[in-house]
Image (spheres, rainbow, N blue to C red):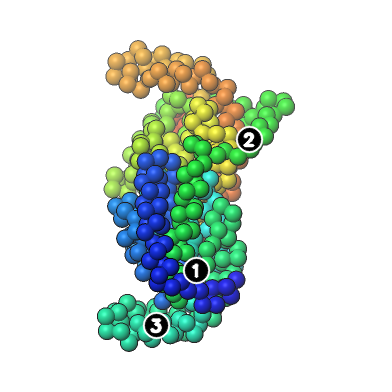
Amino acid sequence: MFESAEIGHAIDKDTYDAEVPALREALLEAQYELQQQKRFPVIILINGIEGAGKGETVKLLNEWMDPRLIEVRTFDQQTDEELARPPAWRYWRQLPAKGRMGIFFGNWYSQMLQGRVHGQIKDARLDQAIAGAERLEKMFCDEGALIFKFWFHLSKKQMKARLKALADDPLHSWRISPLDWQQSKTYDKFVHFGERVLRRTSRDYAPWHVIEGVDSNYRSLTVGKILLDGLQNALKLPKGKASGMNPAPLPSAVDQMSLLNSLDMTLSLDKDDYEEQLITEQARFSGLMRDKRMRKHALVTVFEGNDAAGKGGAIRRVAAALDPRQYHIVPIAAPTEDERAQPYLWRFWQKIPARGMFTVFDRSWYGRVLVERIEGFCTPADWMRAYGEINDFEEQLRDAGVIVVKFWLAIDKQTQLERFQAREAIPFKRFKITEDDWRNRDKWDDYRAAVGDMVDRTSTEVSPWTLVEANDKRWARVKVLRTINLALEEAFDKSDKHDKKKK
């Protein structure tokens, strides 16, 4: 795979000097067009052999283009804040917005390669990381991102000569780091696993570009032209993201039965039983959150449900069991301009809690397959692929020790009408009822179908849905707390068994 990047590609100075002015002008023009259109972000991944000119090339790109529109990010050793969250969290936080460019050093490929070369992970873990990188990039591209992946290459002999030349130059010796010399000793392993990663992750939507790094003129012109061609082609595409083929419609049940229809909506608790069980479950929850085993986990609860189903009341009873410093409640509304400039999961990644902490999502990423589906805010292709993206997202959370508990609070149509009318009649509750609530009620059947599809496709062993019979608010509140407690206890038991196996 790297043979053609070891044959001595070079461009003479006269040719370089003649071509650079036009290339710079075209790159700037494309960059400003990108900013003006604000249709997609550009993600540039920088990887390869130490000493192959990665930093020099990026420095030159900043000179050729407007650096105010380029965000250069370097991901070195993970910070304590990053170690307390899923591995992808650090990358999601730094994504460029639509109309901007992001250049990533030390990206997900660097992490997996360094880990495998130095024996920190085995082949099976490398394969998992490769698959995760493919899913991540596929989602970014499906959301409209343009991805460039560059591997800067040198032969083993060229690398050693390059490092020696830099080390002997008083003006540039500072650029040589211990990592550079370390990689010279592990060159063969690095290239072996690098080829494996490139072969597995070069896709039509995000191909790898292998750049020979010996000659700076060749290296710079080649990278500049690849960027220019990719930008110009993307900017010429019709406005609006291509949705591809329309997916086949999801089948409905022939007998019209669904999980929601199977719920017993008469379940209830009298006041005395409610107060006794509520206090018991709140005390249980408080104790579990203070358990030392919680240091290995974070807790995320997702509250979805019909309008007026009592999500707010259930959340308040959960929060009442804890010190306010332990949790964060995140109400989800329509995305802001900044949020619309990113993939739809971006705003939720920002709120993932650290280990030992608890985040409540009042509405969530499931809006993609609910309100966005019903209101036509995204294409059928978008919300159809979202099921898989969400499952992958929640699996990443689980793998990082995050316990995800998801609730759908269900009420029947008559109960909703009564609660709407009660809200309108009580002055201090009128703020809870809006025109959107009545409009959503008119789409009751559409939402029930969407909820059925959502549960069918995203209720997994990793993070199952709990359907809560919420006609009786007391029953719903106790069931929510009891479900959270059971999820915590199950996670702690699994951790205990895992720790015993390690011993």
Name the residue beneath numbered marker 1: 211
Name the residue beneath numbered marker 3: 163
Determine the CA span between mark 2 and mark 1.
38 Å
Res. 83 in view:
no
On screen, 464 above or below 413?
below
On screen, 79 above or below 158?
above
The mark found on residue 69 in the picture is none
| Amino acid tagged 3 | Leu
Q: State the residue at coordinates (44%, 38%).
A: 364
In the rendering, at what x and y percent does residue 447 appear? 54, 26
In the rendering, at what x and y percent does residue 256 appear? 68, 25
On screen, 248 above or below 230?
above
Name the residue beneath numbered marker 2: 246
Determine the CA span between mark 3 and mark 1.
18 Å
Badge 2 vs badge 3, beta-carbon distance below 8 Å: no
Image quarter of the N terminus: bottom right
Which of 18 and 74 lies nearest the eye of the viewer? 18
Please rate how many residues cluster around mark 3, counting C-alpha atoms within 10 Å: few if below 14, some from 14 to 19, many from 20.
Answer: many
Which of 394 and 5 lies nearest the eye of the viewer? 5
Q: State the residue at coordinates (54%, 73%).
A: 5
Determine the CA span between mark 2 and mark 3.
53 Å
Numbered disc in front, either 3 or 1: 1
In the rendering, at what x and y percent does residue 482 appear? 47, 41
